[in-house]
Image: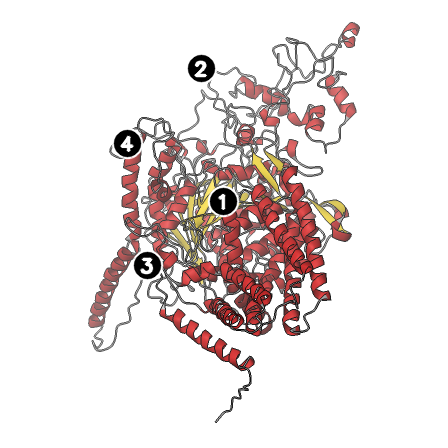
Amino acid sequence: MVKMAANSPTSSPVTITVTSSGGSRSIGLTSPMPRHSISNNANSPLSGGENRRASSSGGGRYLSFSKDSTDEFVAYTVHMPPTPDNRVFTDSQNSPPLEGSKSRGKNGQNPNEGFIKDTIFTGGFNSATKAHARKSSEEVPVMAKSKMVCGMDGCDEKAIDGKFKSYCECGFGICKDCYLDCVENGEGNCPGCKEPYKDINDGENEEEPKSEEKDQANPLPSWGRGVKLEKNFSLVQSFKNPNHEFDHTRWLFETKGTYGYGNALWPREGYEFGRGNDRYENPPDFSDRRNKPLTRKIAISAAIISPYRLLMVLRLGALACFLTWRIMHPNHEAMWLWIMSVICEIWFAFSWVLDQLPKLCPVKRVTDLSVLKERFESSEPNLRNPKKFSDLPGIDIFVSTADAEKEPPLVTANTILSILAVDYPVEKVACYLSDDGGSLVTFEALAEAASFARIWVPFCKKHKIEPRNPEAYFGQKRDPLKNKVRVDFVRDRRRVKREYDEFKVRINALPESIRRRSDAYNAQAEIRAKKKQIELGVSMTEPIKVPKATWMGDGSHWHGAWSSGEEGHSRGDHEGIIQIMLVPASPEPLFGSEVDDENLLDTTDVDIRLPMLVYVSREKRHTFDHNKKAGAMNALVRASAIMSNGAFILNLDCDHYIYNSLAVREGMCFMLDRGGDKICFVQFPQRFEGIDPNDRYANHNTVFFDVSMRALDGLQGPMYVGTGCIFRRIALYGFSPPRATEHSGWFGRYKKRKLLIRSKELKKDLEDDEMLLPINGIQNDDEYDVVKASLAKQFGNSTSLVDSIAVAEFGGRLLHELRGKGCLGRPAGSLAVQREPLDASALAEAVSVVTCFYEDKTEWGKRVGWIYGSVTEDVVTGYRMHNRGWRSVYCVTKRDAFRGTAPINLTDRLNQVLRWATGSVEIFFSRNNALFASPRMKFLQRVAYFNVGIYPFTSIFLLVYCVLPALSLFSGKFIVQSLDVTFLVLLLAITLTLCMLAILEIRWSGITLHDWWRNEQFWLIGGTSAHPAAVIQGLLKVIAGIDISFTLTSKSSAPDDGEDEFAELYEFRWTTLMIPPITIIMFNMIAIAVAMSRTVYSTFPQWSKLLGGVFFSFWVLSHLYPFAKGMMGKKGKIPTIVYLWSGLICIVISLLTVYIYPPNGTQLRFQIP
C-alpha cells in the first residue's frame, strides 16, 4: 500500500473521478499502465472512503485524483487513449492536451511533481509500501485554453481577425485546416457537438467530365493536407515496399486511368496536380533523403576477403597434411612424448577451425543520421504532428552498480551526467540507476549529480561539448577552444569547471560526511535512550541497545544498508527503494534565462530540460536468491515498464559512459530501418581508457571486438557482451520475432521462412513456450483474456506490467511504409504525443515489482528478461534471443560510442578472465549449449556459440604442450624421431599461413599488429592460469553443486594531480592463479640450461634435438614475457613470495630430473628410514 507522509493530514477529503470510453481494454499509448489499477489496492489511500462519479467523453479514458490540504497539493490526471490498433488516424490530435487539464500548472508542469520527486517509496517482503515525503509542493493556478485559439486538441492556431468562422451551428471554434481534416478524415463530424457538418460537397454530385477530357491524362491524387496516406498512392506503396501486393484495379480507380511515375504521360510543369483548384505541386522526388535507408551494409573488399578465405582453406589443408604425417610417423624412442604432442595438436587444430569458421563473412555498417532526423523529427508542423514533437520511440537507460567502495561514486555520477546530456529527445529518455548495495553514498551522489546536471547539460548543448562526461572532458590533453565559435565559451567553461571542482569535493567527501552525520544522530539517540531509562527507573548498569543507524540529511533513517550492518539494513537484507531524482520532462522545449545571481550561464537559446532520473534499489532478503546482476537488471526492466515503458533499453556499467552523444541515434537507425523489427539488440564495441600505452595484458581486447564481433555481424549478429547494448524491450520479454528463418539439412543449406504472427493456423506448428506478437492485435475478447492470463503467469501478478507490454510493442514498430510482409506497423506521428505524469500509485506498483518474492512462480530469469544460472548472464541472454530467430547488429561508430575502464592490474585481470571462463564452462554443461540450438539459428552462428562454451577446455592441452619442450630437453628426445624435411615444410606452411591470415585480418578489421600480438600473448597467459581454474570450478559446480562466488572487479577512479596514472599496473597482489605460469617459466628455463650444458659436454652432441626443444621453449617464454614482467614490479623489485615459489619449483624439478635421468652408472633409491 501507499502511505502518505506522517505530516499529511489524515482527515483531508479525497476525490477520485473516472471517465471512460473506448472499452475496458483501452491502454495509453504513452502510458505504461492503465490507471484503473489505482483503485484495485484496498489499502491504498486512493481507494478507500472516496466518492466516485462517471461521465463520458470522447477520445479515451481519464482518471484524476486530487487531495485538498493546506500543506501540500496533489493532483493527478491521466489520459489513456484507445489501444494502438483501434486508434483513428488523428487520435494523437484528438487526445486532450495535458497542459490544458487540471493537473497541469504553470509552464505545463504538474503540481504533484514536487511530491513525487521528493518522496522516497519503499517496500518489500512482509512490509507495507510506504511513501516517505521529504517536502511539500505549492499549488499552482491553472490556465484555461483561450477561445482565441482553435478548439481542436493539439492545435494552437490563433484566429486572425479575433474570431473563427462558424462551420457548425453549435459555434465550436475551429481553424480552416482542422475543419478540412475533420471533413476528409473525421467522417465530416463536428468535434464539438459530434453532429455532421452541413453543406459538405463530398463529390457525389460532381459532373462527369466531357468525353474529350477522358482521352487526356488525368492528374494523380495528392498526399497533401487532409488526405489519408494509407488510402492513396497504391503504386508508391508497392514501389517502396516490394512485399506489398500491388492492387492494379484500385490504382486505376484512384488515378482515373493515369499511368505511373516515370511514364511519358507525366503532367508537364505547371500542370494542375492533385485535388482542388488551388493545389499545384511538383512530382514527388523519390531521391528525397526521407526515402533513403537509415543504414547501409558495406562488404569487405574482394581484394582482401577472397585471399583471406583462400588462405583459410590452404591452412586447413596444411593442418590436415601435418596431422596425417605426425600420426603416420610416430617417435618410437619416446612414444609418451609423441602421443601427448599429437593429441594436443589435434585439439589445437579443432579449436582453430571453430574460431575461424565464423570469420568467413565479415561486414561493415554505416548509418545516416540526417535521414533519421528528417523522418522522425519534422522541422515543420503537419497534420500528424502539429506541434513538431519528436516521433522517435522512448528509450530507458539502465546503469548498474553494486558496491560504492569498489565502484567509486564519482565514476558513477560522471556516467549519469553523460547520459543526461545525450543527444536524444529529452522527453523520450529515462535513466535508471540500480544500486544493488543499497548505499546512501550512491543515493546522495546521484542527488548531487542531478543538481549539477542543471549546469552541465545546458553547457554541453550550448557549446556542443564532446565527450559529455565532465571528468573526461576537463581531463583532455588538447586545446579546448578548438572548433568553438561562441564568444562566451571561455567564460562559461571557466565557471562550469569551478562548479565541477566543487562537485568533486562534495562527492569525494560523502562517505566521511555521512559517517559524521550518523555518529552525531546516533549519539543523540543514545542520550535520549539514557534519559528515558532514567525516567522509567531502570538501573543504569543495564546496557542500552541503540541501533547504529545510517542517517539521511533530513534526520531520518536511511532505508537501505547501514554501515553497521544491522538486521534489515545490510547489503543483503534491506527493503526496496525507489526515488525519482528528476521528473519526466514535458515535450515542449523550455528555454533558460540570461546570466544573473541564480544562473551561471546564458541559456536564452538553450533547451534546459533534463531527462527523467530514478534511483532504484531492489529488495533483498537472506532467504531469497537474488541472482546477482541479472536479477538487478530484471528488477529495472519491471520498474521501468511501469514508470516510463520505453520501447528500447540501453544498459551500461557504472564505469561505461557515453563518449559519443549521438550513439543512441546511431543505434536507433538499425532498429527503425526496414527489417529492423527482426533485430533484438544493437551491440556497440567496448573501448577503454586508463590502459597503459603498451597494453601489457591485452585489456583493449581489440581482436575480439574488431575481428570476431564484426565477423559475427555478417551471420546472425554479434553476441551480447554485458554493456553498451540497445535492446528491443519485447525481445527481452521473451517474445519471438515477427518473422524467422529455419535452417535444415547439412550446414543449414535449406531455408524455410516463417511468419510468426498470432493466428489459429500457426498454433498447431508452435512449441508450448512460444510467445508471439503482437498481443495487441487480438480482436477476440475471449482469446485476449486467455493470452492475458497466460502473460500473468509468465510476468507476475502485476496488471500494470502486463498491460504495458502491448504499449511497448507498439512503440517499437516500424512505420507503415517500412514494415515487413504480414507485420503490423504504426502511422507516422503516432509517438509524437505527451507522456502521462507519474503518480503515487504508479510508484507504489513499481516498488511492488522490485520485491524479492515477485519472481516466484514466473518466467523471469528462465525465459523472460536476463537469464539466470550463469555468471556470464550476458552471453546466455543473447544466445536465447538468437535461438528464437532474432538477429542482432554490430554498430561501430566513427567516434567511439562508449568508453569505460578495465583492470590493468595483473591479479584483477586474471580474476576477470576467470569469471568469464567459468561462465563458459557453465554454458557448456547446460541446456544453453549450442549443440541443442533450434533450427532458427544459423549453422555458423551455432559454431560461434559452441566455441564460446568449449574454449576454456583448450587450457588442459595448452598446459601439457607448454611443458613438452622442457620434457624434451630434459630427456634428450623430441616430439619427432628426426627433423624430417616434410615435417619442417609442413610446419613452415602452417606458420606462414597463420601470419598471412593475421595480416589480412589486420587489413579488413583495422587493428594493429601490436594488438594482434598482445592478444596471442595473453591467450597463453590466461590459458595457463585462469582457464584451468575455471574448468575445475565449473566441474565442481556441475558435479558436486559447489557454487563459486566471485569478487566484484574494482573500478579505478581518475588519478589526482601528481599521482601515477598507471600505478595499479605495477602493484603486485598474489593469487594462486600465478602458480602454473611461474612453474612453466621455471621449468623451461631450467630445461634449457640443462640441455645446453649436456649437449656442450657430450661426446656426440645432438644439436638438432637441442635446437628443436630450445625453439619451442623460447616460443613459450616469449608468450609469457608480459606475465614475467608483471612479476617484477615497477623497478624490477621481485616480491619475496615469487622467490619462494621459484626456489621451491626449482628444487622439485631438479630432484625429479635426477631421479628420472640419473648420472651414468648410478641408480638412485629413495628409502623411508
Q: Which residue is tagged 1? A: 396
Q: Would you call the spot at circle 1 few (<14 residues within 10 Å), some (14-19), or many (20 or more)?
A: many
How far, Cα to Cα, is label 2 from label 4? 46 Å
Q: Which residue is tagged 3? A: 557
Seen from the viewer's position, the closer of residues 596 and 12 is 596
Q: Position of residue 1095 (x, y in %)?
A: 54, 70
Q: Which residue is tagged 4? A: 491
Q: Is residue 775 visible?
A: yes
Q: Quadrant of residue 227?
A: top right
Q: Amino acid at mark 4?
A: Arg
Seen from the viewer's position, the closer of residues 647 and 684 is 684
Quadrant containing the N terminus in the rendered view: bottom left
Sequence-wise, the earlier of marks 2 and 3 is: 2
Sequence-wise, the earlier of marks 3 and 1 is: 1
Q: Tell me the mark number nearer the camera, choosing from 2 and 4.
A: 4
Q: Secondary structure at mark 1?
A: strand
Q: Say if mark 1 contacts mark 4, CB within 8 Å.
A: no
Seen from the viewer's position, the closer of residues 126 and 771 is 771
How far, Cα to Cα, is label 3 from label 1? 30 Å
Q: Amino acid at mark 1?
A: Asp
Sequence-wise, the earlier of marks 2 and 4 is: 2
Q: Which mark is residue 162?
A: 2
Sequence-wise, the earlier of marks 1 and 4 is: 1
Q: Tell me the mark number nearer the camera, choosing from 3 and 1.
A: 1
Q: Amino acid at mark 2?
A: Gly
How far, Cα to Cα, is label 4 from label 3? 42 Å
Q: Amino acid at mark 3?
A: His
Q: Secondary structure at mark 3?
A: loop
How far, Cα to Cα, is label 1 from label 2? 44 Å
Q: Would you call the spot at circle 3 few (<14 residues within 10 Å), some (14-19), or many (20 or more)?
A: some
Q: Position of residue 1001 (x, y in %)?
A: 59, 45
Q: Position of residue 977 (x, y in %)?
A: 66, 68
